[in-house]
Image (cartoon, rainbow, N blue to C red):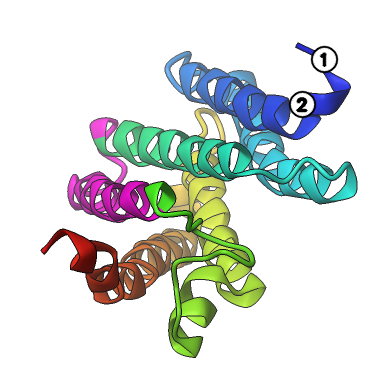
Amino acid sequence: MKIKENAANIVSVVRIFVAYGAIALLYVKTTWAYILAFLLTAIAFSMDGLDGYLARKLNQSSKWGSVLDILGDRIVEVSYWTVFAVMGWISIFFPLVCVARAFTTDGIRSVALSKGYTAFGETTMQSSKIGKFICASRFMRISYAVAKVAAFMLLIVVYTPGIEIWEGTPALHTITMILAWLAIIFCVVRAIPVVAESGKLFEDNQ
């Protein structure tokens, strides 16, 4: 495999392992481990934007790349929500909603892919303007990403051993949970158009 010709896809895969490295460090329970986990989390989510940039810059956009990008998003997002819930930092509700949404939308998008559609871009399965805005617009995608990344990174900050920010700044807890709820609301809202417009995909099979 030629690295230069697959740079975007390689970044999509590598960021999964970067995120896993960050998650593993959360179990070390030391200040420096959490600081490194915080930095690796920032890098992992920065790479989410980098793979798209490389795909456009190097003309490597493809259906496989689109699928790999979404696959990486799901693995990273579900992993963080699940670990945070296991650690007791958030309710189990968060990963359950995230997983249910992922199975629903990705199941529908797999059918769409078989019919030549993609989740984003010029061949997106979304046909309505509002559907394209909610699912594929840069504004919605960036807003969702910012809320999610901010929530994840703040959760790591407030639980960093040796830095008792949680107890000293209760407002930070409130802000963190607001961002977490905002992220999960974005998660659900962005799935609605996918489900609402999925009927056309099955018309030929009726």
* The stretch drawn in magenta includes residue 97: yes
Q: In the picture shown, does residue 4 fall above or below 131? A: above
User: Residue at label 2?
Assistant: 6
Q: Position of residue 45 (x, y in %)?
A: 64, 43
Tag 1 secondary structure? loop
Is 39 left or right of 88, judged from the image as shown? Answer: right
User: Residue at label 1?
Assistant: 2
Distance of mark 2 from mark 1, alpha carbons? 6 Å
Is 114 left or right of 168, judged from the image as shown? Answer: left
* Residue plotted at (18% across, 52% down): 93
Q: Which residues are magenta?
A: 86-112
Tag 2 secondary structure? helix
> Magenta-highlighted stretch: main secondary structure?
helix
* Residue plotted at (63% across, 63% down): 121
Locate the N terminus by quadrant: top right
* Residue plotted at (34% across, 31% down): 83
* The stretch drawn in magenta includes residue 179: no
Q: Residues within 10 Å of mark 1 (few under 14, many from 20)?
A: few
Q: Position of residue 145 (x, y in %)?
A: 57, 59
Q: Nearer the viewer, residue 26 or 101?
A: 101
- Residue flagged by tag 1: what amino acid is it? Lys
